[in-house]
Every structure is written in C-alpha cells, then in structure tokens.
Image (spheres, coloured by chain):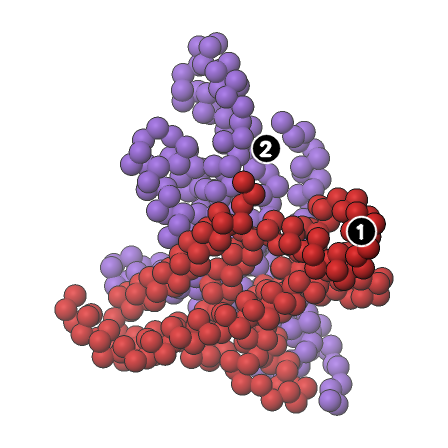
Chain colours: A purple, B red
Amino acid sequence: MTYTFNFNVIWANLDQLLSGLALGLALAFFSILIGAAIGLAAAFAATGGSRFLRGAASVYVTAIRNTPLLVIVLIAYFALPELGIRMGKLESFVASLAIYAGAYLTEVFRASLIGIPAGLIDAGLSIGLTRFQVARLVRFPIMLRNALPALGSTFISLFKDTSIAAAIAIPELTFQARRINVDTFRVVEAWMAASILYLGTCLVIAAGLRRLERHFPKF
Amino acid sequence: MGEFFAEIWTARAQLAEGLLATIEISAVAIFTGSALGLFTGIGLVYGWRPLRWLLRFYVDVVRGTPVLVLILATFYILAVFGVQFTAVGSGMFALSLFCGGHLGEIVRGALQTIPATQIDAGKSVGLRMPQILLLVLLPQALRQILPVWINTAVEIVKASTLLSIIGVGELLLKTQEIIGRNFLTLEFYTFAGLLYFLVNFSIERFGRIVERRLALA
C-alpha cells in the first residue's frame, strides 16, 4: 500500500491529454450531427403513414440499440474494407458512432414529434400549408425544442462513448491516459487525470445545456 | 457461405465458452450492481449526511466517467495496490460499480417521487422505518424503475464487450481469436453482433412481460 503520488507526469503530458479531450469532443460533435440527421429521417419515418418505412425505422432502432458499440466500431473499421468500403480510423469511428447515436435519437425525436398537439398541425393545414411545409415550419421547430434536454444528454453519453475509439488506437483521452499508464507506471495519476477531465467536461456541457434550455422557452 | 458455417462448427466450443462468459459476467455485474444501486439510492435519500455526500461523490464520478475508463482504471489501479484480482474479477468489479452508480441515481429519483405522506401513514399504523422502506416505499419505487432497470441490464451486456480490451475471454475476445485464425472478419463480427442482439432482445422482451404483469390495472 505504499504508493507515492507524483503528478509531474501529468503536467508533462497535459497537452496530449487535452488534445485527446478535444479530439473526443470533435468525434462526439460530428457523430451527433450525422446521427441527428439519421434520427430525424427515421423519426419522421416512424411517425409517418408508410407501413414499410415505419417497419424499417423500428428494425433499425431495435437492432442498433441491442448491439454493443464496440462490435459496430470493429465491424466498420476491420470488416467493411472486405466489402470495398475503406475509411480512415476517424471516419469509420464517426460513422459507427453516428449510426449508434441515430438509433437513440430516433426515439428522442419520435417522442417529441408525438408530443406535438394535433391542433397545431391542423391549424397549419387549415391556413393552407402543405404537409411538407407543416413538417418543416411547425413540427420540426417544436420537436427540436422538446427534444433539447434529451439531445443534450445524448451528446454527453456520446462524448463518453468516444473513449471506445481507444480500441482502434485513435489518440483520444482514454488512449492517452493508457499510454501514460503504460509508459510511466503513474497508474493512479493517469486515470485520475482522465476521470477528472471527463467528469469536468461533462459537468460543463450539462451546465451549458441548462442555460440553452432556459434561453429557448419551452413550448 | 458454406465455409462460414464450417468455421462456426469448428469454433463452436470457443463461441459457446465466450457466450457463457459474457452471460455470467453480465449476470454477476447486474446482480451485485443492483444490490449496490438499491443501497446507494436509499442512502442518497434517507442516509445521514456524510454518507449522502460519499454516495453522491460515487454516483457523480461513475456517471461522469466513461465505462471503459472505469474498467481500465480498476484493472490497473487494483494491481498497484496489491489487490490480486484476475482480469475477469476486476472487470466484474468495474461493471458492478458502473451498474450500481447508474441504478443508485434511478432508485433515488423513484423514491423521491413517492409522497412523504406515505411515510407518515406507515408510521401511524405502527411501522418502523426499515419496515416502511421494505413494505411501503420500495415496492412502489421498484415498479417505477423496472423499465430503466431492464435498460441498464442491456447496457451492462453491451459494456461487457469492453472487457475484451483487458483480455477477458468473453464473447468478443473469443470472436477476435477465431477471426485471427480464419480471417472471416465480417462474418464473425456480424455473428457476434447477432448473438449479442439475441441476448439483449431476450432481456428486453422478458422485461416487457414482467412490466405488463406488474402494471396497475
């Protein structure tokens, strides 16, 4: 039990840790951007009139939500090249995380779409908007506001999921912490630093989201 | 395709071993994690102040840290402090901590939605606090958390794949070993994904059935 702390290693590697953190945030950002597009399309499909599209959205959501992210990441990076789909590490990870996020966001957007009062849609139709205009001008903005809290917590969990990128040697925060751990044997310090950076970032994002939610009045 | 089925047949013992390990690890983690989560949730609401602070710290750290960091940190740190755990042991430990932290917050939320008048009512019919907790509060809270609890179980099965990174011979690591031998990357990763899907889908269906049976009217 004689472990003496030495945080010099952390200060010496701080720029790597921080660039790892920034990389993780960037991965999460691009993933949620693409994932939101997928989720949006799937949510309108899931609440739409076509039985085929409803079924397809439901299969997508069920399949992805019950499959481990690491398996998706490994398939995208190691197996898709067999089918001629070649991507770099970063692209394949963002694609995996986006597909993963898309399934969760489908549920988020679907719940928000269902929550829109039917009277508003009727009102839109009655002033002569087309169905597409109602979707774009009425349902979409209200849905986005209703989905904001869940969208935020999805972003936070995606940011934490970027740690899985370490499994395909993307130099994000977890990868850097493990490298410090293996190179210097400052085991406790390395993981404490990683944990504090993750936790701190999550808290900052959560606080920012609360402000954003206050800024846009809830419908 | 014929080659693929032949390879599955060759690897059947390895696959079965991996699948069993995954189920066993997940079951242990869900079981101990649920006990831990129940204790944490109750402690967060009714514990004395220092205990509440301690549990709040535990829950916030676990919820704010990626599960992979938790797994790696447990694996490396326990060894430094001379705790002789196998990779499986430290992996189960990390997953239980993860499960307990998330469930603790959920149990806390459920307990706090139960009106305080119920505690008064319990006291007025002569129940003591442990009895009130066991007979009045927990049954209501547990019904409420059931859907989230099922969700957490699925998350644990998914998170158990991360133990392959510290060398635990669960389904994903076994799959990687098989791929290392026959190079059927796409086929075997997809097959593993399918097995995970089946396990999780069963948990989800089972949860739905229990939910329906417990539903009020």
Per the image, the residue denoted by label 2 is A145
Badge 2: few (under 14), some or many (20 or more) residues near its Cα, within 10 Å?
some
Q: Is residue B41 left or right of residue A88?
A: right
Q: Tell me the subunit letter for badge 2.
A: A
Q: Position of residue B86 (x, y in %)?
A: 54, 85
Is any atom of residue B88 visible in this view? yes
Q: How many marks?
A: 2
Q: Residue at x 30, y 80 (%)?
A: B13
The residue lying toward the viewer, choosing from B10 and A27, is B10
**Separation of disc 2 and disc 1 at Cα?**
47 Å
The residue lying toward the viewer, choosing from A171 and A138, is A138
In the rendered image, the residue lying farthest to the left is: B2
Q: Position of residue B176 (x, y in %)?
A: 35, 75
At mark 2, the secondary structure is helix
Comparing marks 2 and 1, which lies closer to the viewer?
Answer: 1
User: In the picture shown, does residue B116 fall above or below B206?
Assistant: above
User: In the picture shown, does residue B150 fall above or below B117?
Assistant: below
Q: Tell me the subunit letter for badge 1.
A: B
- Give the position of the C terminus of chain B as an image quadrant: top right
Q: Position of residue A96 (x, y in %)?
A: 41, 56
The residue lying toward the viewer, choosing from B140 and A54, is B140
- Are discs 2 and 1 located on one and the same chain? no
Q: Is residue B37 left or right of residue B148?
A: right
Q: Is residue A182 left or right of residue A210?
A: left
Q: Is residue B190 left or right of residue A62?
A: left
Per the image, the residue denoted by label 1 is B125
Label 1 amino acid? Val
